[in-house]
C-alpha cells in the first residue's frame, strides 16, 4: 500500500495562493505580512497537516531556537521561578531552555558555557542564588547574554534585577498606612547585598519613624527571635518591624507571641521574598514583599529575544516588587 505523500511548503504556498517565500515567512513569524495573508497560509498548513521541519527551520533562520540558562542556585529557590517566567516568554516563540547548574563553581560554569556554545544556543540567561553583581561570562561573539536577578559588573551588559529598594519603601509605606509610627528594622548579614540595600532603603524612607538602629544578623528564624528579644530587652518603643526576609519575620512573630505581644494588634510585621512555605505557615500569615521572580524571568527573556533580533538593551533594568498583604499587618 502506497503511503500518502507528506505535504511540503510548496503545497502550502500553492493552496494559499502565495509564493514559497511568503508562506515560509507567515509560518515562521518573520517579515511584515498582512494579517489576512498570514491567516490564509496557516489555514492552508492546517488543511494539509503541514508541520515545518525543525532542523530546516533552524538552518533557514540561522538559529537553533534554544536558549541556555546558567544558575548557581542549587536548590532552585530563585532560579526555578525565573525559569518558569522565562519559559512563558520563550515558549511563545517555540524556543527551548537548557538549564545548567554551576553550583557556585567557576570551572563547572565554564564547562557548561562551552557546552551551550557548542550547541549553538541563540542566547544565554545567567542567574544565581543571590542578588548583587558578578563578573561577566565569556560568551562567544554574536551570542547575547542577559543577567537576571543578579547583575553583570560590565555596564555594557544587560541585567534585570529586582527593585529591592523599592520593595523596602513599599513595606514602610504600608506600615504607615495602617497607622504605625515607630518602626524597627531587622535583617540579614551586613555584608550581604540584599540585607544591606533593603535595610538602607527602609531606614532612609523611615526618617524619624525609625524606632532603633537596624539590627543585622543571620537569615534565620533563630536570629529573628533573638533580635526581637533584644528590642524588648532594651525597652525599645516600636509598633512595627520591617524584616529582611520571611524567615526572620517568622522568628520575630514567635518571639513577640511568647512575650505576650499580639501580631498585628501590638506589633505589625512585614517580611521580604514572599516565600509561601514560610509566609503562609507563620502565625499569623505574613505580609511580605514579593520580588515577582516569574515576572523578572519574563522580562529577562523578552530582553534576550530583542538582543537576539539585533536590538540589545544594555544597562540595569529594575523589575518592580509587589506588596502581598496578609494578617501580620491587617487583622482578619
Image (cartoon, grey):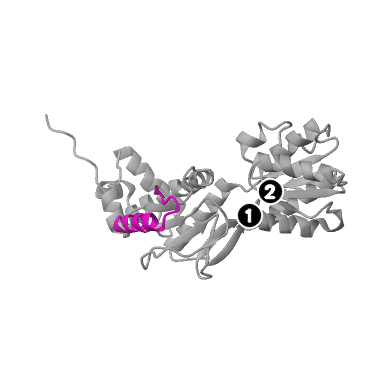
Q: Earlier in the sequence, mark 2 or mark 1?
A: 1
Q: Is residue 227 left or right of residue 2?
A: right
For the residue pair 104 and 29, the one nearer the viewer reads as: 104
Other-residue count near label 1 (Cα within 10 Å), few / some / many at <14 / 14–19 / ≥20: many
At x 64% / y 53%, what residue is drawn?
Answer: 189
Other-residue count near label 2 (Cα within 10 Å), few / some / many at <14 / 14–19 / ≥20: many
Residue 105, image x, y percentages: 42, 54
Viewport quadrant of the C terminus:
top right
172 lies above or below 222: below
For the residue pair 194 and 254, the one nearer the viewer reads as: 254
**Whether residue 287 can be seen here:** no
At x 63% / y 36%, what residue is drawn?
Answer: 278
For the residue pair 68 and 94, the one nearer the viewer reads as: 68
Badge 2 marks a residue whose secondary structure is loop
Report, in whole angstroms, how far the alpha carbon at label 2 lies from the one at label 1: 8 Å
Q: Is residue 279 left or right of residue 62?
A: right
Q: Is residue 62 left or right of residue 277?
A: left
Contact? badges 2 and 1 (CB < 8 Å): yes
Q: Give the magenta part as a residue range.
A: 97-119
Magenta stretch: residue 9 in it?
A: no
Residue 233, image x, y percentages: 83, 43
Label 1 belongs to which residue?
Answer: 194
Amino acid at each position: 500500500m502506497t503511503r500518502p505523500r507528506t505535504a511540503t511548503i510548496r503545497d502550502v504556498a500553492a493552496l494559499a495562493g502565495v509564493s514559497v517565500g511568503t508562506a515560509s515567512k507567515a509560518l515562521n513569524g518573520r517579515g511584515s505580512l498582512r494579517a489576512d495573508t498570514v491567516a490564509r497560509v496557516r489555514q492552508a498548513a492546517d488543511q494539509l497537516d503541514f508541520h515545518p521541519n525543525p532542523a530546516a527551520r533552524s538552518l533557514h533562520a540561522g538559529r537553533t531556537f534554544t536558549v541556555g540558562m546558567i544558575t548557581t542556585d542549587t536548590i532552585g529557590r530563585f532560579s526555578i521561578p525565573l525559569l518558569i517566567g522565562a519559559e512563558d516568554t520563550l515558549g511563545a516563540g517555540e524556543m527551548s531552555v537548557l538549564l545548567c547548574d554551576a553550583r557556585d563553581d567557576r570551572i563547572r560554569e565554564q564547562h557548561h558555557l562551552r557546552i551551550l556554545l557548542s550547541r549553538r544556543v541563540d542566547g544565554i540567561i545567567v542567574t544565581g542564588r543571590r542578588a548583587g553583581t558578578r563578573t561577566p561570562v565569556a560568551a562567544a561573539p554574536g551570542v547575547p547574554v542577559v543577567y537576571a536577578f543578579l547583575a553583570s559588573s560590565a555596564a555594557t551588559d544587560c541585567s534585570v534585577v529586582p527593585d529591592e529598594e523599592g520593595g523596602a519603601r513599599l513595606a514602610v509605606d504600608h506600615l504607615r498606612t495602617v497607622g504605625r509610627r515607630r518602626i524597627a528594622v531587622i535583617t540579614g548579614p551586613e555584608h550581604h547585598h540584599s540585607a544591606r540595600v533593603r535595610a538602607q532603603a527602609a531606614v532612609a524612607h523611615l526618617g524619624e519613624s525609625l524606632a532603633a538602629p537596624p539590627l543585622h544578623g543571620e537569615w534565620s528564624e533563630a536570629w529573628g527571635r533573638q533580635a526581637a528579644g533584644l528590642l524588648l530587652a532594651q525597652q525599645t518603643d516600636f509598633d512595627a518591624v520591617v524584616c529582611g526576609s520571611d524567615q526572620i519575620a517568622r522568628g520575630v512573630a514567635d518571639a513577640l507571641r511568647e512575650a505576650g505581644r499580639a501580631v498585628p494588634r501590638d506589633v505589625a510585621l512585614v517580611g521580604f521574598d514572599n516565600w509561601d512555605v514560610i509566609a503562609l505557615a507563620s502565625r499569623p500569615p505574613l505580609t511580605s514583599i514579593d520580588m515577582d521572580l516569574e515576572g523578572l524571568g519574563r522580562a529577562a527573556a523578552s530582553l534576550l529575544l530583542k538582543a537576539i533580533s539585533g536590538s540589545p538593551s544594555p544597562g540595569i533594568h529594575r523589575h518592580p516588587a509587589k506588596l502581598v498583604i496578609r494578617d501580620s499587618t491587617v487583622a482578619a
